[in-house]
Amino acid sequence: MLQPLLEIQPNRVRRNYRGGALLEALEGRKAARDDDRPEDWIASTIRAVNPGLPPINDEGLSAVCDPEGRPIALVELFASAPDFYLGSEHYKFYGTQLGFLAKMLDSAMRLHVQAHPTAAFAQKHLGSRWGKLEAYVILGVRDGCDPHIRLGFQRPPSPAEWRRIVMEQDIPAMDACFDPVPVQVGEVWLVRGGLPHAIGAGVLMLEVMEPTDLVVRCEFEREGVVVPEEGRFMRRDPDLAFQIFDYTPLSVADVRRTCRIPPVTVNESETHLIGPEHTGSFSISRISATRTTRIKAAGRVRIGLVAAGCGHVAAGPVKIQLRPGVRVLLAAGAPDCEFAAADGAPLHVLLCEPGGMDASAK
């Protein structure tokens, strides 16, 4: 039986940094703690790449539960009825791939400096349809933390010097290339391929990106967490990996002007965060309800994450209770749906959907 609305199950994934306590708290665990699974891949039809770690079958693939309560991977769900769950145009363009990856990330430490390829570079050199452009929506900050990111080179080295810095792990010289860029809850940031970046300690975010796990890691060790050799340069020759970097000098003011995306109000219940003017790969909007808000059928798959508030979402005969951290899948074939807040407190839901089907991701 086709389901217009499904709840997506928690899907913690291992990474080369520590965190995840805030994710465990969202899952309702009383003894929330940090570990090596600081990310929850909300809507993933790709497998995680964790070289150097013991393999886990299908790590990274998201799942829902069928009406009998049995888990089924999104890739299997989409393959079972692609026109209904994804939409016919989506299926023609992307097949049974979702076309983006959405995840929650909770960092207990500053992440290793890294960069991702553009789609053009990935298509030319890596045999991938996508690179890894990313968008951040800041959801929360740990107590006592000074929330910030590194983004772009504030004092760019020459390509030869950057290669030396990374290969020799000259961390003081690496640190000297960057200034901290402050972030706040509610802000939206766009990280284009080629820009070196690192998320600071204590930041909880929704991260939506092109659906790959392609990454060049520039710091091989932080706070005792070592990136294995095979996980540093996308399993390619370092000389190829170093070609992805954008050495444009960007002051903190430049970063805020070019990479911080101002929200655009569509109407009293919808705010536009990321769209085709930023990337052809995905869009993000925020739905806000104080009572009941009706969202029209879209004819394409949508993924919702509750950022704040409680209530429910209903589509056809299906109703799912909502609280912070709950994530749902709205099928392309779903009818109009309703988001309803509980007790008059605002309900805020972030909706992610694939980009246009007539162009490649930018």
Image: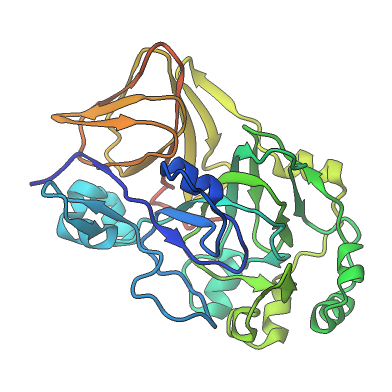
In this rendering, position of residue 50 left or right of residue 3: right
Closer to us: 262 or 64: 64
Q: Is residue 237 above or below residue 97?
A: below
Residue 218, can we see it?
no
Q: Is residue 16 above or below residue 316?
A: below
Look at 85% across and 45% down and name the residue there.
Answer: 252
Closer to us: 176 or 109: 109
Question: Looking at the image, how many numbered discs can be counted on the residues?
Answer: 0
Residue 23 position, x and y percent, is: 49, 47
In which quadrant is the C terminus drawn? Answer: bottom right
In this rendering, position of residue 315 left or right of residue 36: left
Closer to us: 240 or 47: 47
Look at 34% across and 75% down and name the residue there.
Answer: 57
Q: Is residue 58 above or below residue 7?
A: below
Residue 94 position, x and y percent, is: 34, 60
Residue 245 found in image quarter: bottom right
Look at 70% across and 39% down and name the residue there.
Answer: 260
Residue 359 position, x and y percent, is: 45, 54
Q: Residue furthest bottom?
A: 237
Residue 165 position, x and y percent, is: 86, 77
Residue 233 found in image quarter: bottom right
Residue 274 found in image quarter: top right
Q: Residue furthest left?
A: 1
Residue 193, can we see it?
yes
Look at 66% across and 73% down and name the residue there.
Answer: 216
Look at the image and name its color scheme. Answer: rainbow
